[in-house]
Amino acid sequence: MYKAALILYITCLALYILFSRQPDYFDGEMNVATIHFIKDSTSGNMQAFAVYSTGKKEYSVHADYLFRSFKEGGRVQVIYETSQPEKGAVYSWWGYWITWGEMLFSIVLLVLFYQAAIAITKNPSPEALIQQLEYKPRKKRKYED
């Protein structure tokens, strides 16, 4: 039962991740961007931005993300939709495909569902136990007539 539940969980998570990314992986365009550090006007800290061009105009997107670091002038892949090139994202496993918020929520949800399944099946009623003990599988014929 645990294997089936884990396989179902991993399948649902993989399908969610594959089809919920913005900009869309299947419709998006890839381009090479250069990392530039720009001073933030509100906090005064240097923040990394990926600067890329679509051929008509130059765009920049925020490139900083938890546990990800860049060097000035570094090259990264950027994904964007042609209808909204200003809403691009740095294309990487950590930050585009897998985000910390989704992974944290997913793990919490998995633990909660596991605990709920244990709580539901932990103390069966006496009638259910008797029914399980009296169960005898009927013989199946190889070929039904």
Image: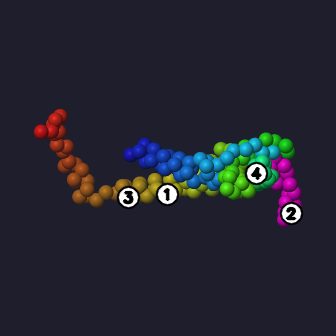
Q: Residue at x 67, y 56 (%)?
A: 83
Instruction: Give the Cα distance between marks 2 and 3.
Output: 54 Å
The percent position of residue 33, horizontal first and vertical second, equals 78, 45
The percent position of residue 134, horizontal first and vertical second, equals 19, 49
Check if mark 1's residue and mark 3's residue have beta carbons within 8 Å: no
Q: Earlier in the sequence, mark 2 or mark 1?
A: 2
Residue where numbered disc 1 is placed: 112
- Badge number at residue 41: 2
Q: Which residues are magenta?
A: 35-51
Q: Residue at x 17, y 43 (%)?
A: 138
Q: Tell me if residue 138 can be seen.
A: yes
- Badge number at residue 120: 3
Mark 3 element type: helix
Q: Say which of 86 and 39 sits in front.
A: 86
Q: Tell me if residue 66 can be seen.
A: no
Type of amino acid at the residue the image marks with label 3:
Ile
**Left or right of residue 11: residue 17:** right
The percent position of residue 27, horizontal first and vertical second, equals 61, 49
Residues packed near mark 3 inside 10 Å, few (<14), some (14 to 19) or many (20 plus): few
Residue where numbered disc 4 is placed: 63
Q: Say which of 67 and 86 sits in front.
A: 86
Type of amino acid at the residue the image marks with label 2:
Ser
Mark 1 element type: helix
Q: Marks 2 and 3: which is nearer the front?
A: 2
Residues packed near mark 2 inside 10 Å, few (<14), some (14 to 19) or many (20 plus): few
Q: Residue at x 41, y 55 (%)?
A: 117
Q: Say if the magenta span includes residue 41.
A: yes
Mark 4 element type: loop
Q: Marks 2 and 1: which is nearer the front?
A: 2
Q: Say if the magenta span includes residue 113.
A: no
Q: Earlier in the sequence, mark 1 or mark 4?
A: 4
